[in-house]
Amino acid sequence: MEILNSQKKYVSLRNPSICSLFLRAALEGVIAKHFGNDIMDELFNRYTKKVVESLNPEANKLIVLFDLLKNNN
């Protein structure tokens, strides 16, 4: 594990659409495998709306996406 205390290591995604596209690129395959491709557009449109609702221009909120990969070998 690594403690990420340097701002240079974070990816800043201030635009909600870019944030949603970034997450979709990372998770679409896994979600589609479990739930099918039919829900993908609606799911990420709703996610984008939730990101917009959660952003407050006066607060500098940070969304951190942490991936943990397990090697089965």
Image (cartoon, rainbow, N blue to C red):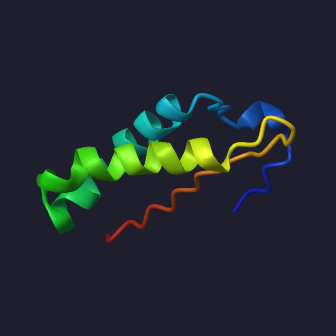
Horizontally, residue 49 falls left or right of residue 37, namely: right
| Pick the front one: 73 or 10 | 10
Q: Is residue 57 above or below residue 37?
A: above
Quadrant of the frame with the N terminus: bottom right
Identity of the residue drawn at 65% across and 30% down: 14
Spot occupied by residue 51 in the image (x, y as percentages of width and height) = 57, 46
Q: Quadrant of residue 55?
A: top right
Identity of the residue drawn at 52% across and 57% down: 67
Q: Is residue 36 above or below residue 65?
A: below
Identity of the residue drawn at 48% across and 31% down: 17
| Pick the front one: 49 or 68 | 49
Spot occupied by residue 15 in the image (x, y as percentages of width and height) = 59, 28
Q: Is residue 51 above or below residue 35?
A: above
How many marks can you see?
Answer: 0
Quadrant of the frame with the C terminus: bottom left
Q: Is residue 60 above or below residue 36?
A: above
Horizontally, residue 1 falls left or right of residue 48, namely: right
Spot occupied by residue 35 in the image (x, y as percentages of width and height) = 18, 66
Horizontally, residue 18 falls left or right of residue 21, namely: right
Spot occupied by residue 37 in the image (x, y as percentages of width and height) = 14, 52
| Pick the front one: 12 or 16 | 16
